[in-house]
């Protein structure tokens, strides 16, 4: 059965990550008393307040909460797209974000967005190889060889290597984007509701693809979603955020075994975890509705 822990408790130790090429134990995120205020001299919108969370190397954390609770703000801070008002974030013990620190996006953290970001004028293969070639980490030949191996290992996507994104389904586009992130060998994958616009069947298929990728590479994943079933099925921990000002209300431990299967969603353990998550999120959503809050972050 799942258990609840305070947001200030650390997560468990890292575990082996078969198939990963990054160093063992990489990808530990420490989020410590993080705060973010938008327009401090005007509207003074407190998006995040005293938000603390520890994510172990190779951990899969899903963050849920009402619209405007600060989920995307927190992801943007981790990505280096936004700065903090208070607190600090470290990655493997090294400063990532803090007061007075200029945001620093980097290849060690790669974001997959909800609306997609593939270059429509590039083929699938050119999209996947773009990062390491542009950064001069790999030669074009080396990047193409690695990309084809990744594509082949992700449901035979090598067969669409010469296809342009506009000819692909949204599900295939998301799969290509995740592989484009992985070829850079990041320490952390930041997924911002990547499956939100998909129909039920496509979303279910993508869940299995992401689970397969996670089992193979065991990268640290920070995943934002509004879908509680999705969060529980995919993650090791489901973090519930409060309505604005956003802080972490609770962490739900997901003790479903891996590899995960879709039929686990009918198990008593899954249903109890979902009951806990619904109760926590519903209370915060009600508060947000009563306050008439709108989504800012």
Image (spheres, rainbow, N blue to C red):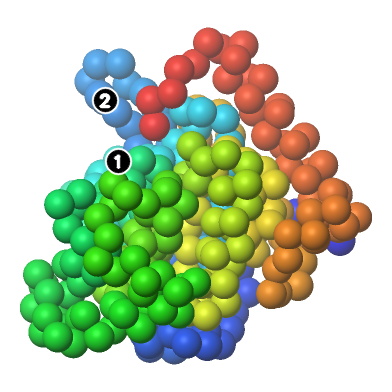
Q: What residue does disc 1 label?
A: 85
The label number, if any, that marks residue 40 in the structure image: 2
Relative placement, left or right, of 133 versus 220 is left
* Residue 268 image offset from top left, x and y in percent: 91, 55
Query: Label 1 crowding class (10 Å Cα cut-off): few <14, some 14-19, many 20+?
Result: some
Q: Residue at point 56% right, 12% down? A: 291
Query: Label 2 crowding class (10 Å Cα cut-off): few <14, some 14-19, many 20+?
Result: few
Relative placement, left or right, of 77 versus 141 is right
Image quarter in which the C terminus is found: top left
Does residue 130 sit above or below 274 in this rendering?
Answer: below
* Residue 15 image offset from top left, x and y in percent: 58, 84
Q: Residue at point 55% right, 56% down? A: 206
* Quadrant position of residue 258: bottom right
* Quadrant position of residue 160: bottom left
Query: Is residue 92 at least partly visible in the picture?
Result: no
Image quarter in which the N terminus is found: bottom right
Does residue 181 sit above or below 201 in this rendering?
Answer: below
Disc 1 vs disc 2: Cβ atoms closer than 8 Å? yes
Nearer the observer, 25 or 121: 121
Q: Residue at point 45% right, 74% down? A: 156
Query: Is residue 68 at least partly visible in the picture?
Result: yes
Does residue 202 sit above or below 244 in this rendering?
Answer: below
Q: Secondary structure at mark 2?
A: loop
């Amino acid at each position: 059965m799942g258990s609840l822990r305070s947001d200030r408790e650390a997560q468990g130790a890292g575990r082996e990550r078969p198939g990963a090429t990054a160093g063992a134990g990489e990808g530990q995120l420490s989020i410590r008393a993080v705060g973010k205020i938008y327009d401090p001299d005007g509207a003074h919108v407190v998006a995040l307040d005293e938000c603390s969370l520890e994510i172990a190397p190779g951990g899969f954390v899903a963050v849920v909460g009402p619209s405007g609770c600060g989920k995307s703000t927190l992801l943007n801070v981790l990505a280096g797209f936004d700065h903090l008002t208070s607190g600090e974030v470290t990655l493997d013990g090294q400063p990532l974000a803090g007061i007075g620190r200029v945001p620093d996006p980097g290849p060690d953290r790669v974001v997959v967005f909800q609306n997609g970001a593939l270059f429509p004028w590039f083929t699938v293969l050119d999209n996947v190889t773009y990062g390491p070639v542009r950064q001069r980490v790999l030669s074009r030949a080396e990047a193409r060889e690695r990309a084809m191996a990744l594509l082949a290992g992700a449901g035979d996507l090598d067969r669409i290597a010469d296809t342009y994104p506009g000819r692909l389904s949204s599900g295939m586009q998301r799969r290509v984007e995740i592989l484009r992130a992985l070829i850079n060998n990041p320490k952390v994958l930041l997924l911002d509701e990547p499956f939100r616009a998909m129909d039920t069947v496509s979303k279910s298929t993508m869940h299995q693809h992401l689970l397969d990728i996670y089992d193979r590479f065991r990268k640290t994943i920070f995943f934002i979603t509004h879908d509680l079933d999705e969060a529980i099925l995919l993650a090791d921990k489901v973090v519930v955020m409060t309505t604005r000002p956003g802080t972490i209300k609770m962490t739900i431990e997901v003790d479903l075994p891996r590899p995960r299967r879709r039929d686990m969603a009918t198990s008593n353990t899954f249903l109890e975890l979902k009951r806990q998550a619904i109760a926590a999120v519903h209370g915060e959503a009600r508060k947000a509705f009563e306050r008439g809050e709108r989504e800012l972050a």
